[in-house]
Image (cartoon, grey):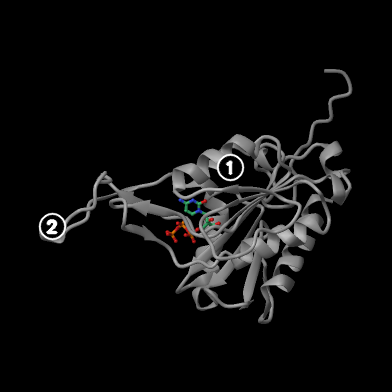
Amino acid sequence: MKNRRVQRPHPTNNGVGRDRRARRTRSDSMKSPSEIRFLITAGPTREFIDPIRFISNRSSGKMGYALAEAARALSPHVVLVSGPTELARPKDVEFVPVTTTQEMADAVLARYDHCDVSIMAAAVCDFRPKTTATQKIKKTKLGGTLELEPTIDILAELGKRKKSQTLVGFAAETEDIEANALDKLQRKHLDLIIANDTRAFESDTNAVTLIGRNGKPERLPEMSKTKVAAVIIQRVLGLRR
Ligand code: CTP
C-alpha cells in the first residue's frame, strides 16, 4: 500500500466527479489513443414470439458502425457487438454478431472488464415476450394480447460494474430530449450521453447533443454520422486526459 495515491473530491465542484466508479488510475489516463480498448454496441436486438415473428426497435446500426470505424482509426483494439443490420462489417475490428438482448448483454459483460471505453449505441429491446413458441403460432390460435417481460438494461449494468472505464450511452428521445438524457446519464453512471432525436433513425445524418457529467449540453449541427462519430471519439479522448 506504499505510495498509494488517494483521490479526494474537489471541495468546490458540487460533488461532480465524486462517484467512486468514475475514478481513473494514472496509468489509464496516460494510455496513448492506440492503446485504448473500445467496446461498442450497434444495431437493434430482436425478441422472438415464435420462429417467424419477433419484436424489435428501429435501428440501421449506422451510428454504432461509424463509431467503430472512428475508434479503429485510432486504435487496433475495437470490439463491435452488433445486432442484425444490413451493413458491411467494419474492417479490422473484432465483430461479435448477436440477436437477442440477453446475447448482447452476455457478449458485452464478458468483455467489459478488459475495455477502457464502452459506447452503447445499440437500440436494445427493453421487453421480450414472456414465452417464445417453438413452432409458428397459427393465426387462428393467436390471442389478442402479447405478454411481455423486461430484458436486462445492459448500460445500467455496466454503470453498476464500472471501475475505470469511460462509459458512453445514447438516449433516443421524442420529447424533453436534453432533460431526459441528463437524467439517464446520472441514473446509469455514465461519463457522456448522446441525446439523439428519433428523426435521425435510418438516416445518414444526425443532429445530436452531447452531455457530460457537468450537465452542460454541447449541441452539434446536423452532420453525417461519420462526422458525429469522430466528434464523440474526440470528446471521449478529452474525458480521459
Ligand atoms: N440500453 C441498453 N440496454 C437496454 C436498453 C437500453 O444498454 N435494455 C442502452 C442503449 O444502448 C442506449 C441507452 O441504454 O445507449 C439508452 O437507451 P434508451 O432506449 O434511450 O433508454 P432506456 O434506458 O431504455 O429508457 P426509456 O425507455 O425509459 O427512455
> Would you say 223 lies left or right of 58 here?
right
The front one of 26 and 67 is: 67
| Residue 11 on image: x %, y % | 75, 46
Q: Quadrant of the N terminus?
A: top right
Q: Which residue is mark 1?
A: 108
Q: Which residue is mark 2?
A: 143
Q: Does residue 76 lie above or below 61 as drawn? A: above
Q: Does residue 19 lie above or below 48 as drawn? A: above
| Residue 172 on image: x %, y % | 50, 66
Q: Earlier in the sequence, mark 1 or mark 2?
A: 1
Q: Does residue 32 lie above or below 114 as drawn? A: below
The quarter of the displayed image where residue 64 is located: bottom right
Q: Between marks 1 and 2, how big is the CA–CA gap?
A: 35 Å
Residue positioned 45% across, 74% down in the render: 175
Residue positioned 24% across, 47% down in the render: 135
- Amino acid type, label 1: Val
- Answer yes or no: disc 1 within 8 Å of ligand 1: yes
The front one of 146 and 173 is: 146
